[in-house]
Image (spheres, helix red, strand yellow):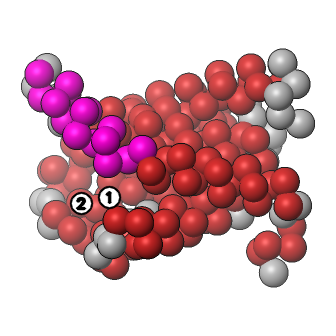
Amino acid sequence: MLLKKFTLKDLIYISLLAAIATITKIPLKMASKLFASTFGLPGGIINGMYYMFWLIAAYGIVGKRGTGILFCIIQAGLSIYIFSMPSIKVITFIPPGLAVDLLNVIINCKKDTKVFMALGGAVANVAGTLTMSILVMKVPLIGLIMASMIASISGGIGGYCAYIVVKNLKIYQLQS
């Protein structure tokens, strides 16, 4: 039912962006931890910007409800297949997509606007951070609050960066 809304072109865009995001996660994770720890920051700050960039870029390019969850399901499947990731960790891939799709239902506007994409990145990153913090890391409440604040900022920056890229793709007619 969900897939009937998407054209083949939409599915290719979503799949390619999900594949790029998944394949580049591991090297980026190592590099971002090294870079962020130099400044005394958690590595997840950079990762959140990067992860949400791809999700929100897919949403901005395709612009259809269900893009977020489909993107995250593809990412989860690729992570299981390529990295043999444990299922508890793969479950944390789904909430960001659900959060963006829910935001789409609540705020019914164009999906390639600056506000929607920045807010979408923030909401998606908070959803992913909370899921990871609760299910995997068992973080206490004060830690959840702090992590959510940082996640909203980094996810919002990632969403805004996605807005800039999607806008330029449309200006130069590289994407329809």
Number of marks in the image? 2
Residue with the mark numbered 1? 130
Q: Callout 1, which amino acid?
A: Leu
Residue 172, percent from left and from top: 84, 18
Decide: is 80 above or below 62: below
Q: Residue at x 61, y 59 (%)?
A: 71
Quadrant the C terminus occupies: top right
Q: Quadrant of residue 153?
A: top left
Q: Callout 2, which amino acid?
A: Ser
Q: Is residue 44 visible?
A: yes
Residue 63, percent from left and from top: 78, 48
Residue 68, percent from left and from top: 62, 58
| Closer to the camera in the image, 163 or 119 | 163
Residue with the mark numbered 2? 133
Q: Main secondary structure of the magenta part?
A: helix
Q: Is residue 123 visible?
A: no
Q: Residue 1 shows which numbered tag?
A: none
Residue 157, percent from left and from top: 47, 28
Residues packed near mark 2 inside 10 Å, few (<14), some (14 to 19) or many (20 plus): some
Q: Residue at x 79, y 73 (%)?
A: 3
Q: Are marks 1 and 2 in contact (CB under 8 Å)?
A: yes
| Closer to the camera in the image, 119 or 78 | 78
Residues packed near mark 1 inside 10 Å, few (<14), some (14 to 19) or many (20 plus): many
Q: Which region of the structure is painted magenta?
A: 24-38
